[in-house]
Image (tube, rainbow, N blue to C red):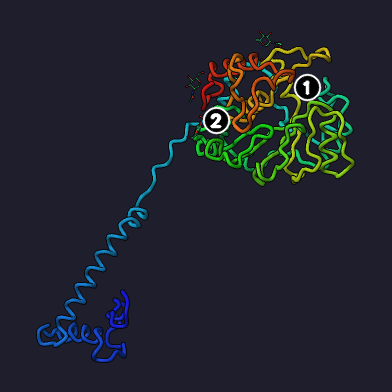
Amino acid sequence: MSGSDACSPAQVARGSRDASSPQEPCYLLRNMINKSSPLCTCPAGWKLLAMLALVLVVMVWYSISREDRYIELFYFPIPEKKEPCLQGEAEMKASKLFGNYSRDQPIFLQLKDYFWVKTPSAYELPYGTKGSEDVLLRVLAITSYSIPESIQSLKCRRCVVVGNGHRLRNSSLGDAINKYDMVIRLNNAPVAGYEGDVGSKTTMRLFYPESAHFNPKVENNPDTLLVLVAFKAMDFHWIETILSDKKRVRKGFWKQPPLIWDVNPKQIRILNPFFMEIAADKLLRLPMQQPRKMKQKPTTGLLAITLALHLCDMVHIAGFGYPDAHNKKQTIHYYEQITLKSMAGSGHNVSQEALAIKRMLELGAVKNLTYF
Ligand SMILES: *[C@@H]1O[C@H](CO)[C@@H](O)[C@H](O)[C@H]1NC(C)=O
Ligand SMILES: *[C@@H]1O[C@H](CO)[C@@H](O)[C@H](O)[C@H]1NC(C)=O
Ligand SMILES: *[C@@H]1O[C@H](CO)[C@@H](O)[C@H](O)[C@H]1NC(C)=O
Ligand SMILES: *[C@@H]1O[C@H](CO)[C@@H](O)[C@H](O)[C@H]1NC(C)=O
C-alpha cells in the first residue's frame, strides 16, 4: 500500500485515538464502524467501498504469498536415513584380515613414549622409529598427539576415506562425503574447486613431506588433523625445521617439499608407524626387512584404510582404484593430468593393493562409494 490516503490496518485498529481529519479514509471507516451507518448515506461511500475491496485483495494476496512460509513453519523434514552404525563392526570384520593384532596401539606417536620410558622399536622407518628417537622427541614436544574430543566422544564413528582417484570426477559425491563423522583425505588432494565431487570437510589428512600441499590453509579446515606419515628420518627433520624455523634441509627428498608451510603446530600429528607395518605385513605380505634397492611400501591410501579400520566403526571408501595397466592415457587423479606411468619406481604395487582392497570389500569390512 502506498500514498497518504491509504489506511493501514494499524490505523484502523487504533481508531478514534488517531487525530486524523474527518476527510481522511480512516476517519470515514471509523465512523462507519462506530455508527454502523449505511454506506449510501456517506458521500465518499464508493471510494470507501473501492478501498475495502483493495484491502481485501491485498489481504488475500498476502495470505497466499505467506503460504510458502506457512509450509516452511510447519514442515518438519524427515530425518535423513543415515546408515546404521554398529559399534565395533569394522574391527570385527577386519580381524579376518589383520588377525588378532593388538588394538591398544596409539593412533599417533606419544611424547611420553620418547621422553620417560624410551619404548624400543623393532624397526627403522617406515615400520618403526628405531634410530629416530631424538628428532622425534623434539618434534613431539612442539606438535600434539591427542585425539580431539570431537572424535573421542563419538559413540559410533562413520568414516569415509577419500582417495585421489579419477573416478571422483563428476561423481557429485561432495554432499554425501561431508555427512560422515570423519573424512580422511590423502596427500595434496585439493578440495577448493572440487567441493561438489569430493566435499569440503577434512577431519584428517595423511601426508609426507613430498606430498604436502603448498597451501595447507586453503585445502584443509582450521581443525583438520595433519597427520605426518614418515617414510624416512628426513621426514621428521623436515617438520622440525618448518615448525622451529631452523635451517631448511634440501637434500634427501625425492621431490622438493615446501620450505615454508603455514600451519598451526597443534594441528600436526605423527602417525604411529605400526599402521605401516600392519598394512605391509598383513595386507601386502611384504617382508619387513627388504633389500635397500627394491623397497616396497604401501600407498598412503592403503595406509589410510588400515588406520580407518582401527579408528572407525564404519569405513567407506571413495575414489580408490587405478585404471587398467593397458590404459596408458587415462589420468589417475581427479585433479591432475598424470597417468600410471608416473607410478613406476614409486615402490607401490598397485595391483597387489587392489587385491587387498577387493578382499576388504568381499569381507564387508569396507564399502565402496565409487566403482572399484
Ligand atoms: C593371537 O595370535 C597369536 C599368534 O598368532 C596367538 O599366540 C595368540 O594366542 C592369539 N591371541 C588371541 C587372544 O587369540
Ligand atoms: C565431467 O562433466 C563435464 C561437463 O558435463 C564434461 O565435460 C567432462 O568430460 C566430464 N568429465 C569426466 C571425467 O567425465
Ligand atoms: C605386484 O603384485 C602382483 C599381484 O600380487 C604380482 O604378481 C607382481 O609380481 C607384483 N609386482 C612386483 C614388482 O612385485
Ligand atoms: C563398488 O564396486 C563394484 C565393483 O567392484 C561395483 O559393481 C559397484 O557398483 C560399486 N559401488 C558403487 C556405489 O559404485
Please state which of residues 19 and 138 is positioned toward the viewer in this rendering. Answer: 19
Instruction: Measuring from the top left, give residue 203's x and y in whole percent.
Output: 63, 39
Please state which of residues 171 and 26 is positioned toward the viewer in this rendering. Answer: 171
Instruction: Measuring from the top left, give residue 343's x and y in whole percent.
Output: 69, 21
Task: Residue 88: name its quadrant.
Answer: top right
Residue at (58% x, 17% y) in the render: 327
Residue at (33% x, 57% y) in the render: 70
Q: Say which element carries label 2.
A: helix
First-in-chain label (2 vs 1): 1
Ligand 1 located in image quadrant = top right
Q: Say which element carries label 1.
A: loop
Please state which of residues 340 and 267 is positioned toward the viewer in this rendering. Answer: 340
Vertically, is 80 above or below 342?
below
Q: Mark on residue 168?
A: 2
Residue at (72% x, 27% y) in the render: 105
Please state which of residues 115 and 10 is positioned toward the viewer in this rendering. Answer: 10
Instruction: Measuring from the top left, give residue 75's x and y in whole percent.
Output: 35, 50
Provide the residue designation for mark 1: 127
Marks 2 and 1 sit apart, C-alpha to C-alpha, by 31 Å
